[in-house]
Image (spheres, rainbow, N blue to C red):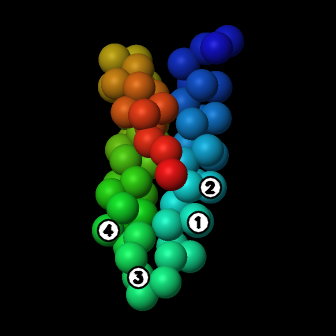
Amino acid sequence: MPNIIEGLLSEIDRVKEIIAEYEEQPNNAGALGASIMKQDIKEAKKVMAYNDTVGMMRMYEKLKELEL
């Protein structure tokens, strides 16, 4: 990973793809999971805006763990 910001942006993009998959689930089955992941992305963007390096590292690890 070249730097934490690039890594975090990459993870945000990856998680957005997962969210799209969750939102396509029938009967809104993935709505809760998608909502939680959207909150995680919002938090990741917030720590980036505040230039919070520790927060960015924490969010990077948290997003990295998310999968389908």
Identify the residue under disc 2. Answer: 17
- Amino acid type of disc 3? Asn
Identify the residue under disc 1. Answer: 20
Q: Residue at x 37, y 47 (%)?
A: 40
Sequence-first tag of 4 and 2: 2
Sequence-first tag of 1 and 4: 1
Q: Residue at x 56, y 55 (%)?
A: 18
Q: Residue at x 58, y 65 (%)?
A: 21
Sequence-first tag of 3 and 1: 1
Mark 3 or mark 1: which is in front? 3
Mark 2 and mark 1 in contact (Cβ < 8 Å)?
Answer: yes
Mark 1 neighbour density, 10 Å: few (under 14) some (14–19) many (20 or more)? few
Does 31 sit above or below residue 49? Answer: below
- Amino acid type of disc 2? Glu
Q: Residue at x 55, y 43 (%)?
A: 12
- Amino acid type of disc 4? Leu
Q: Circle 3 — which element?
A: helix
Q: Circle 2 — which element?
A: helix
Is residue 19 visible in this depiction of the protein? yes
**Image-based side of 55 in relation to 20, left or right:** left
Identify the residue under disc 3. Answer: 28
Calculate the distance from the C-alpha at mark 1 to the C-alpha at mark 2.
Answer: 5 Å
